Amino acid sequence: MTEQHCDIAILGGGLSGGLIALALAARRPDLKVSILEAAPALGGNHVWSVFDTDLQPGAEALLAPLVTARWEGYDVRFPAHSRQLDTPYATMTSARLDATLRATLPADAIHCNATVVSATPREVRLADGSRFAADAVIDTRGLKDFSAFKGGWQKFVGLHLKLYRPHLLTRPIVMDATVDQHDGYRFVYSLPFNATEVFVEDTYYADGPALDVTSLRQRVLAYAESQGWAVAQVVAEEQGVLPVVAGGDFDTLWPQSGRDMPRAGTRAGLFHPLTSYSVPDAVRFALALADRIDLTSNGLADFSQRWSSKHWKEGSFFRMLTAMLFAAADPDKRYRVLERFYRLDSRLIERFYAGQPTLLDKVRVLAGKPPVPLGRAIGVISGLGNRPAPLQHPRRQEH
């Protein structure tokens, strides 16, 4: 049984918690920071990607040590058209996040296999009897209660494949929707790490959260075969079930772990409502937090609640689009929404992914004949149509 004191205790060593720790190390090296992570390693088992245009000044320096691959553009493929876009794109991995945090922080700042028994804004107790007293505790452990949201799910299984022969890809395929449509909108995502290694992910915008891992693994391998890629080895696997938000109640979301507990990341609802994309929000929040003067528990609780509230209000347009995708489009025709979107101006697409569309962008996205039944589209936009049901907790299935 031990007792320790630190200035900032971070619950969770994933992307959000890790970026906060790195930002504090860079901008507030005087502070003692502790990361408490339940898993044996930091970062989980993830591949995260980001467009250069998502990042504000100062962000590239924060992310640079985490980047494992970078490309000068990407491709998309749909039944009616394909397109190359010139927006630079980079990928980060959990392993690189773990290594960077261990190289940056003192050894006694990182505590893995740390099972939290109780947490308050200024104290954390672990199952082994350890106690951490802190000027502030920040909860970044991810979203556990989805009841505040209505919408659907983005779910996926990704395999890091080592091939016998080069795959010949020179840039990522961010969406290949020419594949057969199952369980809503389906597309395959491919990242060429090097000449003979590629990460392939089978992704769905689905009404339900059930994830049939075995079937999706088989579809990834079948896709690789269809591309002429002979698989020598599956190096690693990633799975995920993420909320895609069409509506909900912010006041229900926030008290999840207590209104006085500072929080960050998906725990605070900081992700793109339509893409489930969290990197830009995690970076913005980490840098803004590190630049604050008041890092007390009360100061950070107020700061994180106001930040999350502002993010929720700014996401109303994306929630409406999510409702249109799930309530107005037939599941096997949802790809048409994205197919039309990827005919728009590339700079609009960049602002959309960054979560910062202009008023003109919003008008342009909605202008013209919608790629869904007109009556349903009007119903969703007016608020009179059907809306997706409240979200239930996701489940994984192994068949």
Image (cartoon, rainbow, N blue to C red):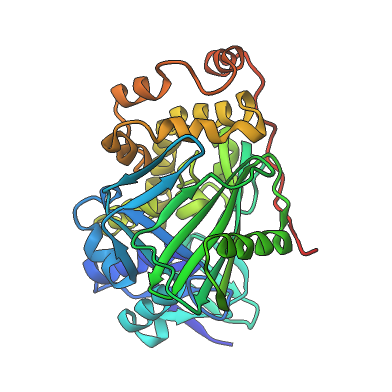
Residue at point 58%, 56% (across, down) = 202
Residue 278 in view (yes/no): no
Residue 306 visible here: yes
Q: Quadrant of residue 32?
A: bottom left
Which sits in the foreground, 94 or 265?
94
Residue 126 percent location from the top left of the image = 60, 76
Pick the quarter of the image with the N terminus. bottom right
Q: Vertically, is 49 above or below 319? A: below
In the current view of this chain or complex, which residue is farthest to the left?
A: 57
Residue at the location (31% across, 79% down)?
104
Left or right: 346, with 146 as reference point: left
Front one among 299 and 13 = 13
Q: Residue furthest right?
A: 399
Q: Residue furthest front?
A: 228
**Residue 249 location (% of width, % of height):** 58, 33
x then y, percent, for residue 44: 53, 70
Position of the C terminus, as image quadrant, is bottom right
- Depth check: give the residue in front, 63 or 329: 329
Compare residues 325 and 95 and report the one nearer the observer: 325
Q: Is residue 396 above or below residue 387?
A: below
Give the image quarter of residue 237. Answer: bottom right
Q: Quick check: 52 above or below 43?
A: above
The tally of labels here is 0
Above or below: residue 233 compared with residue 190: below
Q: Position of residue 369 (x, y in %)?
A: 47, 16
Task: Kindly identify the residue that appears in the image at 42 percent across and 73 percent down.
Answer: 166
